């Protein structure tokens, strides 16, 4: 306040001297007093509240006054207001006006549907048809070409003739469900006959398109071959934090990645594959000149760990498929096989139990496998028990020929039922940590004549090895695969999940 007074009087001392001075203001006039008085009066209060008060009676007087003024200014009820009206339209003019006016349809307007006819309109005896119809149909599961054409409006005899023509070019069974048919129907002479087929085009096979068109001599079929490049797809890269994710990020199909992991795990435990290791796979691939791509079987699988490399090649002979390494040596086969490819964390014999804390007989072997690793049957047998079994957790017991039995404990999930027959290598469950367990692993037992034996001391395996002409052809096939150029590999040094050529 002192600073503001200083600005008025020009100094701080003068400002302090004005602090006790009383300023005299002029008195308001009578007009200002009346205006302030009427401004505080509410002439139109809410008549629904404060009923009976002075403000309410003031509002009621205002309402009565307004009603009185309205009645005084009214022309009266005995003197109507006269105005001219339009002449009545005849039905024809009314219909034409309704078709050309902008009004709701409920009031008779037909705007957007038709326009009133004039003298230039020629009345047709019937509604005309389109000269041609272009349709698209899809073959359903278990459907046939002839039925699809008939549903699209093609006559029965003509659809049978077209199906016979296509059958001569490609077996009808080769046409897959979901194939799209592009159909063009022509003009028909009368409405009581089907439209004639003018053109039919579809993809009969991946390497063949078929077209049926009508010419001067009638319908004729034309084969359109499609060039196919069958160069396999080869992808190479680092494993990173996940082999599956790294391969999928490079564009490898999911089924091919699964086949790769299954093939490699038969020779190399997945737990031993590190982030800096490199994988290399080759997959069948067919690329059409029209841009479509189809992938097939896995042909080659490899994992390089420094100077060591595990290489597996697909070999088909006599209707059977076997995987061999680069030397033509196949996987070990025999009466028994290990249920998982993993390191042994605890052997057979006496030991101190990690949970109970006292020495007891360990009747099996523990394999330290990651959680969810598939557990496979050691050999052919029958499921004697599948369910919960005390400290074993989720437990499966298989009975085999010759008085042998195998048992699998601590599973996370069981994949078989009691009484079912299983084959050697069939998945019966997945590694877990149920029961008395300190971590994910498989407890595997082998029984002979009801007595537990050390599974690592029993071996009934054989090795399949190629020789002679088969070995020569195998080496030639391997050399051809190694000449396959890299395809969808990508370079990314910063991210271990991405691939690098």
Image (cartoon, rainbow, N blue to C red):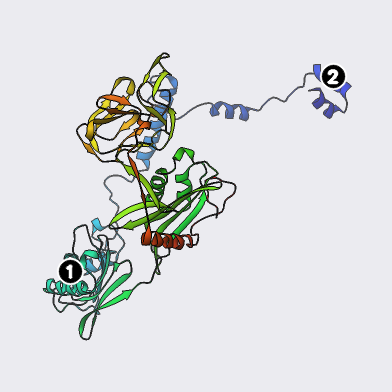
Q: Nearer the viewer, residue 118 or 452?
A: 452
Name the residue at the left extreme: 192
- Image position of 74 with respect to 14: above or below: below
Q: Residues within 10 Å of mark 2 (few under 14, many from 20)?
A: some
Residue 354 position by quadrant: top left
Secondary structure of residue under mark 1: loop
Which residue is located at x 21 percent, y 37 percent?
421
Secondary structure of residue under mark 2: helix
Which residue is located at x 87 percent, y 28 percent?
10
Quadrant in the picture for the C terminus = bottom right
- Spatial separation of the CA atoms under disc 2 and disc 1: 107 Å
Residue 198 in the image: state x and y as whole percent. 23, 77
The answer to whether 200 appears left or right of 475 in the picture is left
Q: Nearer the viewer, residue 342 or 95?
A: 342
- Image position of 202 with respect to 294: above or below: below
Which residue is located at x 37 percent, y 31 percent?
457
Residue 105 position by quadrant: bottom left
The answer to whether 2 appears left or right of 455 in the picture is right
Q: Nearer the viewer, residue 148 or 314?
A: 314
Residue 104 in the image: state x and y as whole percent. 28, 57
Q: State the count of labels.
A: 2
- Residue 499 — which label? none
Give the mark, 2 or 1, whose residue is nearer the N terminus. 2
> Mark 2 highlights which residue?
16
Q: Residues within 10 Å of mark 1 (few under 14, many from 20)?
A: some
> Mark 1 highlights which residue?
153
Q: Nearer the viewer, residue 61 or 479?
A: 479
């Amino acid at each position: 306040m002192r600073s503001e007074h200083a600005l008025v009087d020009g100094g701080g001392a003068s400002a302090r001297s004005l602090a006790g001075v009383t300023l005299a203001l002029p008195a308001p006039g009578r007009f200002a007093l009346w205006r302030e008085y009427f401004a505080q009066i509410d002439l139109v209060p809410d008549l629904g509240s404060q009923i009976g008060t002075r403000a309410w009676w003031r509002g009621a007087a205002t309402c009565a006054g307004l009603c009185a003024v309205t009645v005084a200014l009214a022309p009266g009820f005995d003197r109507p207001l006269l105005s001219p009206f339009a002449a009545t339209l005849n039905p024809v003019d009314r219909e034409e006006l309704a078709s050309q006016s902008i009004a709701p349809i409920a009031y008779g307007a037909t705007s957007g549907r038709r326009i009133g006819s004039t003298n230039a309109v020629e009345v047709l005896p019937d509604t005309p048809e389109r000269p041609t119809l272009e349709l698209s149909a899809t073959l359903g599961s278990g459907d046939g070409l002839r039925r699809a054409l008939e549903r699209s409006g093609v006559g029965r005899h003509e659809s049978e003739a077209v199906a016979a023509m296509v059958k001569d070019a490609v077996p009808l069974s080769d046409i897959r469900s979901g194939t799209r048919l592009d159909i063009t129907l022509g003009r028909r002479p009368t409405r009581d006959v089907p439209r004639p087929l003018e053109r039919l085009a579809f993809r009969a096979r991946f390497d063949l398109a078929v077209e049926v068109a009508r010419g001067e001599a009638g319908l004729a079929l034309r084969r359109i071959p499609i060039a196919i490049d069958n160069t396999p797809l080869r992808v190479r890269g680092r494993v990173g934090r996940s082999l599956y994710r790294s391969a999928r990020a490079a564009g490898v199909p999911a089924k091919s990645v699964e086949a790769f992991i299954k093939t490699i795990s038969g020779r190399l435990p997945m737990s031993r594959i590190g982030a800096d290791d490199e994988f290399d796979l080759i997959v069948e691939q067919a690329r059409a000149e029209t841009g479509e791509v189809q992938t097939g079987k896995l042909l080659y699988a490899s994992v390089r760990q420094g100077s060591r490399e595990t290489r597996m090649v697909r070999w088909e002979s006599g209707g059977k498929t076997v995987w061999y390494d680069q030397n033509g040596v196949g996987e070990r086969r025999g009466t028994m096989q290990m249920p998982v490819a993993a390191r042994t964390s605890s052997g057979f014999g006496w030991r101190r139990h990690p949970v109970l804390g006292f020495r007891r007989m360990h009747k099996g072997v523990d394999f330290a496998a990651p959680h969810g690793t598939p557990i496979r049957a050691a050999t052919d047998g029958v499921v004697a028990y599948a369910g919960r079994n005390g400290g074993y957790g989720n437990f499966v017991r298989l009975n085999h020929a010759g008085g042998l039995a195998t048992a699998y404990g601590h599973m996370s999930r069981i994949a078989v039922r009691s009484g079912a027959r299983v084959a050697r290598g069939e998945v019966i469950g997945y590694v877990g940590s149920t029961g008395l367990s300190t971590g994910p692993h498989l407890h595997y037992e082998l029984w002979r004549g009801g007595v537990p034996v050390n599974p690592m001391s029993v071996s009934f395996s054989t090795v399949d090895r190629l020789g002679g002409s088969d070995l020569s052809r195998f080496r030639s096939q391997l050399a051809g695969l190694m000449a396959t150029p890299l395809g969808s590999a990508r370079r990314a040094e910063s991210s271990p999940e991405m691939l690098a050529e």
